[in-house]
Amino acid sequence: MSWKKSIFSAALGVGLTLAGMAYAEEPQTGGTLNIRINSDIRGTDGLNRDGNTDTVLHHIFETLVAYREDLTIGPLLAESWEVSQDGKTYTFKIREGATYHNGDPVKAADVKWNWDRRVAAGQEWFCNSFFDGSQGLKVEAIETPDDRTVVFRINEPNALFLAQLANIQCNGWIASPKNVGADDKWNPDLPIGTGPFKLKEWQKGQYIALERNADYKPVKEKMSGLAGDRTPYVDDVKFLVIPDTSASETALFAGQIDILPNLEASRIEETKGRGVTVLSTPGLAFTPLLIQTKDPLLSNVKMRQAIAHAIDFAQIANARTNGMSGFNPSGVAQASAFFDDDFLKWPKYDLEATKALLAEAGYKGEIIKIQTNTRYQGMYENGVLTQAMLAAAGINAELEVLDWAAQLDNYLAGKFQIQAFGYSARLDPSLMYGVLLGDKSTDPTAQWDSKEAFDLYLKSTKTTNFEERKALFKQIHALMAQEVPILGLYYEPVTDAVNANVKGYNVWPADKTRAWGVWKTK
C-alpha cells in the first residue's frame, strides 16, 4: 500500500506532528479513563450504527486490517497478508495467539461466519453495496484452508479492497460466533470480541463501561491509528453520555471526564487557560447540508442552484470552526494530498442569481424544512445559519429540530427536504464519494443519483495512479457543482481536550478516540 502512504504523508505530516504527544516516562497500569460522548450507542452488532457507536465498538472488536495514522493500511487481527499477482486473491494470516474475551481462539472459519452473516443482512449492513458488485468490487468467495489462514477472492483488481475492509464505518470486525444464540439473534448485552477492552456494563442513556482485557496479545507492529499494538493500560474506560456541550466542559474542568473529543473551536483558548491540553489536526469528517433531490420542489435543479447561491458558505465555515477550516463543498478534504483549489469551485454567494433562479424554477413561497438537532451543536448552528440566509434570500425556510435518533432515522429512510448533517471521516476520497453516490430507489442514504458521476467514481477505485485519480475526482466535483445534489460546508478540524494526568493520547485525521496505549498518572 505504498501508494497511499506517498499520497497522504506530505499533506498530513505537519498536522500529525503537531497532534502527537511524546512522553519519556513508562506507561502505568490501572485507573479509569472517562471519555465524553454526546449520545448513547445504538447497538453492539455493528449494523445499527453512528459515529459514537463505531468509536466504542472498535475498542471491543478488531478488523483484519486497519488504518494507520498516515492513512496507509496496517495489521490488526491479521498480522500479515499477501496479494496475488493478478490482484484478485488476498491471503490473510490471523495473528498468533489471538483469542476472544471468553478465551476461545480465533479461527479462520469465524471470519467467514462473520462475513456471511453481514452479507445476509443485506441493506441492513451499511457496507454491503461496497462488496456485492453494485459498485464494481465483489467478494466472490472466502476460503479457510487452515485455522489461521483466510483467503478472499474478488472479481477484479480493486485499489480500495483493503481500505474497505478497514473502513471504520463498516464495522467489518470479527466477533465470536457465540454472540449469536440458538435463535440466531445477536445478544446485545454481552458482545464477545478480540479487542483490548470488553464490555463491563451498559447503562443506556448514561454510560458504557469497558474493562481491560488482561489476556490481550497485540500484533507486533507499533500502535498507529487503529492499527498495530492496542495494548490497554487503564483498568476501565467509561464513555459518559453527556448531551449538553456546556455540561461536558464543566465536567472536564472539574476532572469528572479526562477526554473531551470534538471541543468547540470557539472554546479552545479558554480551555487552555484552565490548564487543559488541547490537541488539534486537520480532519476528514465532512459537514454538509443534505438535499432530498426526490422532493417535488427540490428535484428541480434550478431550485437547488438558487439555494446554493443564497448561502454564504465561507461565513458559515469560518463561524463554526473559528477560522480553523475553510469552506469546502467537495468530497476531497483539504487534508488530502488530492486537494487543490479546483475543489472549491461552487455557485458563489449571489442573491441576484438566487432571485432569477427562483423565478425560473416557478417558486411560489413553498415551505422548505431544514431538519437538525441539538445533540450536535455544529449541526444545529448550521441549520440556524442556513435558515436565516435562505429567509433573507426570499426562500420560506423553517427549522425542524428533532432528537438525534429521529433525525438519523430520517436520514436512513431519506425522509427530509434539507438536513444539517455530518459524515464520519472517510480516509480516501473514493470512500466519501462512494457514500454520497448511489441509486436512491434502492439506497435511501444515497444523496446523489447520477450515473455519470457514479461511473467516474468506479474508475477511481480501479487505479492506483495518483494523477489519474485526482483528475477523476475533479470531474466528479465539476458535475456536483452543476447538479447541486448536496451542499458541502467544511471538514471538521479534529480538536480534543485532554486533562493533564492523561498520557499517551493523541489525535489523528480519522477523528476516532482511542483508549488503548493511554495511561493516567497517579
Image (cartoon, helix red, strand yellow):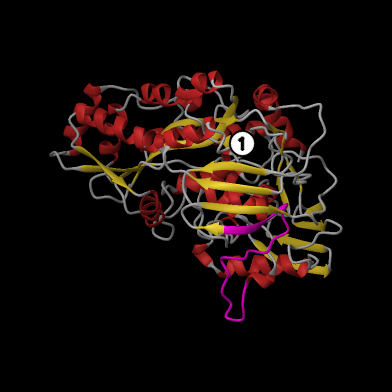
- Looking at this view, is 10 or 262 the one in front? 262
In the image, residue 413 sits, relative to residue 232, either above or below, namely: below
Residue 262's x, y, as percent?
52, 34
The residue lying at 39 percent from left, 23 percent from top is 319
* Numbered label tally: 1
Identify which residue is drawn at 57% across, 44% down. Answer: 431
Left or right: where 115 falls relative to 447: right
Query: Quick one: quadrant of the N terminus?
Result: top right
Residue 183 appears in the rendering: yes
Horizontally, residue 277 falls left or right of residue 451, namely right
Decide whether the magenta segment is chiefly helix, strand or loop: loop
Q: Amino acid at mark 1?
A: Arg
Residue ID for mark 1: 469
The picture quadrant where one finds residue 366 is top left
Question: What SS does tag 1 mark?
Answer: helix
Quarter in which the C terminus is drawn: top right
